[in-house]
Image (cartoon, rainbow, N blue to C red):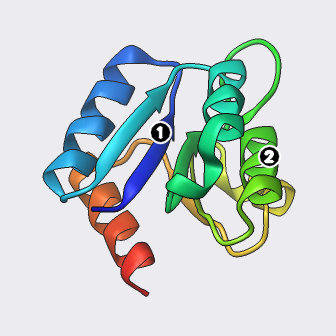
Amino acid sequence: MASILLVEDEPFVAELVEEALSDAGLQVKVARDHRSAVAVLEGDARSFAAVVTDINLGPGATGFEVARKARELNAGIKVVYITGHAAHLARQGVEDALMFPKPFDALELAQRVRRLLDS
């Protein structure tokens, strides 16, 4: 079973996405902010097949920094950004990342993550 790190500061969105990813057969670890996401990655980035991160994580660092740290520690990790500002933010992300705009259907997001991991 593939492991996903979900980084989302909004509890409702985190719960919705976590449930959809779990229902898609993925093991999910949730981090609520940049600091806890980096701590998880520094502990064992190689155990994750993908990181799904909101870009705007509240005050401080963004999902872009989370993704860069994830790729630094695990060059093959897949990255999916979720954001309400996809169009003008895409160029700031890591290469070969999927940008998933808000609002979104959590089941569709889970299906896209599953296809990304299967490719």
Label 1 neighbour load within 10 Å: few <14, some 14-19, many 20+: many
Q: For this view, does 10 lie left or right of residue 54?
A: left
Q: For this view, does 69 lie left or right of residue 49?
A: right
Residue that carries the numbered disc 1 in the rendered image: 6
Amino acid carrying label 1: it is Leu
- Residue 83 in view: no
Q: Image point 43% across, 50% down: which residue? A: 4
Q: Position of residue 85 (x, y in %)?
A: 66, 44
Label 2 neighbour load within 10 Å: few <14, some 14-19, many 20+: some
Q: Image point 41% across, 42% down: which residue? A: 103
Query: Residue placed farthest to the bottom in the image?
Result: 119
Please tell me whether residue 32 is drawn above or below residue 43 in the rendered image. Answer: above
Front one among 11 and 22? 22
Residue that carries the numbered disc 2 in the rendered image: 69
Which image quarter: residue 76? bottom right
Please tell me whether residue 72 is drawn above or below residue 7 in the rendered image. Answer: below
Q: Position of residue 17 (x, y in %)?
A: 31, 39
Q: Image point 19% across, 58% down: which residue? A: 25
Q: For this view, does 54 lie left or right of residue 29?
A: right
Q: Which mark, residue 85?
A: none
Q: Position of residue 2 (x, y in %)?
A: 35, 61
Front one among 92 and 75? 75
- Residue 27 in view: yes
Please tell me whether residue 6 is drawn above or below residue 93 in the rendered image. Answer: above
SS of the residue under disc 2: helix
